[in-house]
Amino acid sequence: MSLCLATAGVVKSLAMASFMLTWTHSVEKIEWQEDWRVTPQGLEIVEVRVNGAGAGMEPPPDARLVDGWFRWKPQLPMSPEVALGKSGLAGERRLCIDGTCQELSAILGRPVGVSVAMMSVCKPDQTAKAVDAKTLLARGDDFNVKGEFDRAIADYDAALKVEPALVEALNGRGMAWRAKGDRRRALADFDAALKLKPDYEVARANRKSLFSEIERAGAQMPLKGKDAAK
């Protein structure tokens, strides 16, 4: 199963069967923990723990005190999705898998702040859409090495939809276009990468090499700028 996290148009998919959510009250300095399971029927909260008691973090009457933690099982039905709001008094939520925790902002790649984040059981189409840009980039690079240039270009296109300023994807796609003999598109991608990152030496070297190839082939291409061959 996979858990999907979403906020402001960003979706991340995490393969897991269970996880813990935790946060700390910014005033009371009390930690709150929730254990969750990801099931085909929805998200199930298994147990809640709070390390003490304070304003807004009071345990229910049926809670058990074990080693300084109040523990209880909320009687809540499974839900296909859960909204994670944030008040000014609660620190940012952290999601923990096998003892490793990350703030939601780090997982989503953007500050969550007081925005509502949604967590849900991923649908098949969500899992496909949630593949991150770095994964797509790595897969595109692999296809490039194998000579599967059309598949490489498709992955670079997908990576750039997720992260438009990913210069490595622009450079990789330029290399794939060049290998396919489309020098014009290759040049456009190298130019775009250098516009975003002028000191990107890999793209600069590829661009210079492409111009040398064009000169050797006697190709006639319109050049932009006085230093186009630099």
Image: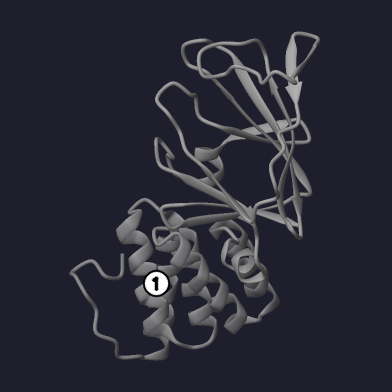
Which residue appears at 49% of the width and 81% of the height? 177
Q: Which residue was labeled with disc 1?
A: 189
Image quadrant of residue 121?
bottom right
Q: Which amino acid is tagged 1?
A: Asp
In the orientation shown, which residue stands out farthest toward the left? Answer: 226
Where is residue 97 drawn, in percent x and y?
73, 38
Q: How many marks?
A: 1
In the orientation shown, which residue stands out farthest toward the front? Answer: 61
Where is residue 65 drawn, in percent x and y?
78, 12
Indicate whether 32 appears above or below 94. above
Indicate whether 150 appears above or below 229. below
Q: Nearer the viewer, residue 14 or 27?
A: 27
Q: Is residue 2 left or right of residue 135?
A: right
Q: Nearer the viewer, residue 75 or 92?
A: 75
Q: Nearer the viewer, residue 220 or 20?
A: 20
Where is residue 61 drawn, in percent x and y?
70, 18
Indicate whether 182 appears above or below 104. below
Which residue appears at 24% of the width and 79% of the height? 223
Which residue appears at 29% of the width and 87% of the height? 221
Which residue appears at 42% of the width and 39% of the height? 111
Whether residue 167 is visible = yes
Q: Quadrant of the C terminus?
A: bottom left
Whether residue 4 is visible = no
Q: Is residue 227 left or right of residue 201?
A: left
Numbered disc 1: secondary structure: helix
